[in-house]
Amino acid sequence: MDNQTGFRIALALLFLVMLVGAGRFRLRSRTKEQLDRRQEGIPMLILLRLAGLIAWGSVVVWIVSPGLFAFARVGLPDLARWCGMVVGLLCILWIGWVMRSLGANLTDTVVTREKAYLVTAGPYRWIRHPLYTGVIPSGVFLSMVTATWWFLMMTAVIFVLLWLRTAKEERNLEARFGHGYRAYMAQTGRFLPRV
């Protein structure tokens, strides 16, 4: 087994753990409530989901056939690539903590559920959008493990889209939770803790 095969197997296992874990939290948060995802704006709705599909599809393609990413290859020593796996494990723990803290509030859109409540526990005590913050190290770990710049580029695109979408999301949260959300905004950073 060459070293590329080892990274492919490790990434496949990590990816499977991530999918199962995130899927479990998503299933737990499901309700019969219909969310109007068009409130994000049709361009944002399409672009964000398309970018996510390309990014996650690229992970699968790299696992199956890493040679297709030869155009994006960067020279990284194996130790750095294995360190990327450690970053990946930390990302899974972070995202799990975020999703667990959100509980039934978890959605894939800027729309707030009817029975939503303001979450200020877990990583939300410091950051208003910790799930979006988790996108950056996820892209770093994927680029390290695959030894390509492709996933950093995809991460940048996705993060910019999430950053743009955040303004609408925060307006919705402010409209829903009023003074409570404004006070929460004054105490926390959007993507990083306030210093």
Image (cartoon, rainbow, N blue to C red):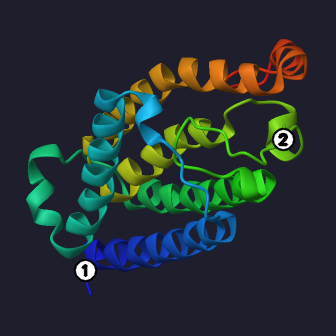
Pointer 1 with pointer 2, Cβ within 8 A: no
Residue 7 on image: x %, y %: 36, 71
Element under disc 2: loop
> Which residue bears the numbered disc 2?
119
Q: Which mark is residue 2?
A: 1
Residue 133 on image: x %, y %: 60, 35
Which quadrant of the view contains residue 169? top right
What residue is shown at x 83% (from left), y 30% (from top)? 126
Q: Which comes before the other along the chain, label 1 or label 2?
A: 1
Q: Nearer the viewer, residue 48 or 180?
A: 180
Mark 2: which amino acid? Val
What residue is shown at x 67% (from left), y 33% (from top)? 129
Residue 27 can be seen in this image: yes
Disc 1 versus disc 2: distance between alpha carbons? 46 Å
Residue 147 can be seen in this image: no
Q: Is residue 7 above or below residue 129?
A: below
Circle 2 residues within 10 Å: few <14, some 14–19, many ≥20: some
Which image quadrant: the C terminus?
top right
Residue 175 on image: x %, y %: 73, 20
Left or right of residue 36, residue 92 in this image: right
Left or right of residue 110, residue 191 in this image: right
Which image quadrant: the N terminus?
bottom left
Which quadrant of the view contains residue 86? bottom right
Mark 1: which amino acid? Asp
Name the mark nearer the viewer: 1 or 2. 2
Q: Is residue 159 above or below residue 77?
A: above
What residue is shown at x 20% (from left), y 75% (from top)? 64
